[in-house]
Image: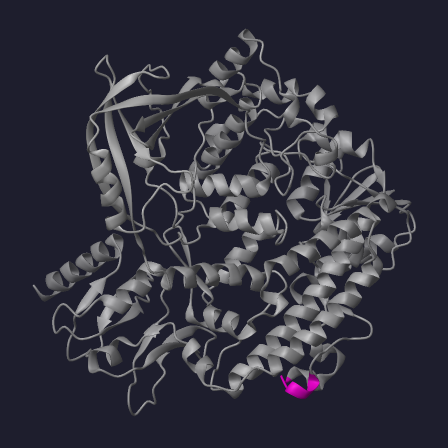
């Protein structure tokens, strides 16, 4: 009998159906030759410090760093019953083979092996490695199972990451929290191998914006007219600059130029630029595009992609970091086109066939798709009508990127005209799309960071600007000259798309872990960051922690990127897990020493601030709101000043809009401060006057709540009548 262990129940059900194991048992499925059971994600975790010594339950300086000579594990209480099911199946005498059918990644390897080792499994292990959960793909995968030993490097990388994250995160968090509490704070300050450098990036950007001072500069523009009366605009450019620092410098040059009424075309440069279809989607690029196109958070995109993979069988494995296909898959790519027939994509398919388009070679690389290939539609017929609206949006984006890989390159004609006025030169640039190519079906959505030195759009000469026909040495008229005042701009705040791109650049996390890390930092329980529309903004506690860490390598993305590179080396078998863990231990010792030596001041007390206290602000006091724990494990906001000075409390804001309303809204009746509350009956959120019950002023914070409030008021009136 063969025992197959999946990572999730839904996955196990797919395997069981494909293999004919249709008899449902308690925690597994049974067939003539196969038993299919499942984990529920992680079933086993590392022991917390108090598991080694009860004294370590309290957080004390003298106990740090905590580095167990041998790491131990425990069952996760909520899922322990399912572990017992798997353990009993592994004990069966008739089990002759065990298949690790967990997700084909580092985490899947770790989840299986922790269970198998704790249960003292004896049967030899094979590995299922597939990128699609269609019946055909599952059967094909089981027909060519791999030896588990082939993935030893992946397993060791999983263990190395787990142990390093525990040592650095737990010790760093305890050390920083102890220092903060000694200086008046009541909050836990979480640190981590990946989360801290990501947070440092956001803090650095926000500090740059807050400290930015715009500087003025000046540009010169000229309006020219050709002999055919065709107008065009040029921008002054010297050998070293395109701008003047002072208006006086600009005016001197402008005065010289105004003596000229004619100019000469000094140079005309034209070239064609081919833009190949973009690579297929890896998870990070898909998350970035969905953020730009639809405003989806990275975690929401991952949820949708996972649903389309596991439940809908519409997409291949989503947690991939490759934008390429393997040679074998490329040879069978027509199977992935067939399900798109008789769908909304049929006209595109018809164009591909009629014009003889084929998949471009730039999208195929066995080396770059070694673990998992890019996200593409499966070879499974899907019922798109049953998709949720957001699933449909994501599926459309993936399908269009996939089909675009068959289309020819887009071609732009770039033209640059250099016009000489006296001894000065003016540049005019134009871009015209000559061949639309793949852009017909997958128009790019760009998001560029604002740059303090970047030119305004009308000065870059970009876009579909067709320039007049001119030749070198042609004389043109100078119809106007202008001095244009500009100011440099602060850099843009990070969006999820931008932050994911920077994380990928530095090697922070993997395609599967970047989205959860961003959401972790946005968790209101910390709180380190908040999302305002699409922008990520650091909160006072985050800025204080990063300032405290200073030059510590934990806050440097390059350090974590180097660790991720070493984990990748462990996967390939070119670096030792033991060396990695030893380095993490030494890093942890140094981290704790540096944190515990931080100077003693009271800044941490202020870093607890979520926002100024509305009541204190109205009274001229400097109180601020802190997060407090309620008796029922809920959280609320309370003023930092003693109760005899200010007793302001409020419910926790659920989003940035609620926080803004709490900070800015005044009672419509008496103009006093207001606090957030919610209705027990329907959980609708509103602002209530701090003078309640003397003043019953209220502001409902969403349209539905306003409607329900009006209905309640009508009912009260009807009862009175």
| Magenta-tinted stretch | 58-63
Left or right of residue 257: residue 624: right
**Image position of 429 with respect to 131: above or below:** above
Residue 26 appears in the figure: no
Which of the 4 image quadrants contains residue 637?
bottom left
Way the structure is coloured: one colour
Judged from this view, the residue extending furthest toward the left is 721
Given residues 374 and 378, the one toward you in this image is 374
| The one of 11 and 520 positioned closer to us in this rendering | 520
Tally of marks: 0
Give residue 36's position: percent from left, percent from top: 76, 44
Provide residue 424's location: percent of width, then percent of height. 32, 33
Residue 250 magenta-highlighted: no
Q: Quadrant of the N terminus?
A: top right
Residue 712: percent from left, percent from top: 19, 61
Q: Residue at x 48, y 39 (%)?
A: 289
Q: Answer left or right for 102 relative to 447.
A: right
Q: Is residue 179 visible?
A: yes
Q: Residue at x 21, y 82 (%)?
A: 619
Task: Measuring from the top left, give residue 622's x and y in whole percent.
Answer: 29, 82
Q: Residue at the bottom extreme?
A: 644
Q: Quadrant of the C terminus?
A: bottom left
Q: Is residue 321 above or below residue 260?
A: below
Q: Is residue 252 left or right of residue 389?
A: left
Q: Nearer the viewer, residue 125 or 434?
A: 434
**Residue at the outermost top position:** 354
Seen at 30% across and 77% down, the residue is 613
């Amino acid at each position: 009998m063969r025992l197959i262990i999946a990572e999730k129940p839904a996955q196990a059900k797919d395997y069981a159906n494909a293999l004919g194991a249709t008899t449902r048992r308690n925690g597994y499925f049974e067939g003539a030759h196969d038993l299919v059971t499942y984990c529920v994600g992680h079933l086993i975790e590392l022991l917390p410090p108090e598991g080694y010594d009860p004294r370590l339950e309290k957080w004390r300086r003298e106990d740090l760093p905590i580095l167990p000579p041998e790491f131990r594990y425990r069952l996760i209480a909520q899922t322990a019953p399912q572990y017992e099911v798997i353990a009993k199946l592994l004990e069966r005498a008739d089990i002759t083979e065990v298949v690790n059918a967990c997700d084909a990644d580092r985490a899947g390897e770790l989840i299986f092996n922790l269970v198998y080792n704790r249960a003292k499994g004896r049967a030899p292990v094979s590995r299922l490695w597939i990128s699609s959960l269609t019946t055909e793909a599952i059967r094909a995968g089981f027909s060519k199972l791999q030896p588990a030993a082939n993935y030893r490097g992946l397993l060791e990388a999983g263990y190395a990451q787990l142990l390093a994250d525990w040592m650095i995160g737990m010790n760093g968090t305890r050390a920083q929290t102890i220092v903060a509490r000694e200086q008046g704070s009541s909050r836990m300050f979480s640190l981590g191998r990946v989360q801290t450098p990501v947070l440092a990036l956001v803090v650095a950007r926000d500090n740059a914006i807050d400290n930015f001072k715009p500087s003025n500069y000046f540009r010169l523009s000229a309006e020219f007219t050709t002999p055919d009366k065709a107008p065009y605009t040029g921008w002054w450019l010297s050998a070293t600059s395109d701008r003047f620092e002072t208006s006086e410098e600009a005016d001197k040059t402008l005065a010289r130029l105004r003596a000229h009424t004619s100019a000469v075309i000094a140079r005309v440069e034209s070239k064609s630029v081919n833009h190949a279809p973009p690579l297929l989607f890896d998870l990070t690029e898909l998350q970035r595009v969905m953020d730009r196109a639809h405003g989806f958070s990275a975690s929401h995109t991952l949820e949708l992609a996972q649903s389309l993979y596991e439940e809908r069988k519409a997409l291949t494995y989503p947690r991939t970091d490759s934008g390429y296909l393997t040679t074998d898959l490329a040879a069978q790519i027509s199977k992935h086109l067939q399900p798109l027939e008789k769908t909304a994509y049929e006209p595109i398919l018809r164009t591909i066939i009629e014009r003889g388009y084929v998949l471009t070679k730039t999208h195929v690389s066995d080396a770059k798709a070694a673990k998992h290939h890019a996200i593409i539609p499966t070879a499974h017929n899907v019922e798109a009508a049953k998709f949720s609206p957001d699933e449909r949006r994501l599926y459309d984006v993936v399908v269009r990127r996939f089909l675009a890989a068959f289309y020819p390159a887009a071609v732009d004609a770039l033209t640059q005209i250099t016009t000489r006025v006296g001894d000065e030169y003016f540049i005019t640039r134009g871009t015209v799309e000559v061949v639309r190519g793949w852009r017909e079906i997958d128009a790019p959505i760009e998001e560029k960071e604002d740059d303090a030195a970047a030119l305004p759009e009308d000065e870059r000469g970009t876009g579909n600007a067709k320039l007049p026909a001119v030749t070198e040495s042609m004389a043109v008229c100078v119809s106007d000259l202008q001095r244009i005042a500009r100011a440099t701009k602060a850099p843009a705040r990070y969006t999820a798309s931008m932050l994911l791109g920077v994380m990928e650049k530095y090697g922070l996390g993997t395609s599967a872990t970047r989205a959860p890390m961003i959401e972790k930092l946005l968790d209101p329980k910390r709180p380190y960051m908040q999302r305002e529309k699409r922008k990520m903004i650091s909160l006072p506690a985050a800025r204080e922690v990063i300032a405290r860490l200073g030059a510590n390598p934990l806050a440097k993305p390059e350090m974590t990127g180097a660790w991720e590179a070493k984990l990748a080396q462990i996967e390939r078998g070119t670096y030792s897990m033991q060396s990695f863990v030893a380095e993490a231990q030494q890093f942890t010792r140094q981290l704790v020493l540096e944190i515990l030596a931080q100077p003693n001041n009271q800044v941490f007390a202020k870093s607890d601030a979520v926002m100024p206290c509305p009541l204190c602000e109205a009274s001229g006091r400097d109180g601020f709101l802190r997060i407090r724990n309620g008796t029922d494990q809920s959280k609320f906001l309370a003023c930092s000043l003693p109760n005899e000075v200010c007793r302001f409390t409020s419910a926790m804001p659920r989003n940035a809009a609620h926080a803004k309303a709490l900070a800015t809204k005044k009672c419509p009746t008496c103009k006093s401060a207001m606090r957030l509350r919610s209705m027990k009956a329907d959980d609708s959120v509103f602002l209530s006057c701090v003078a309640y019950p003397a003043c019953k002023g209220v502001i409902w914070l969403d349209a539905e709540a306003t409607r329900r409030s009006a209905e309640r008021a009508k009912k009260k009136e009807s009862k009175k009548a």
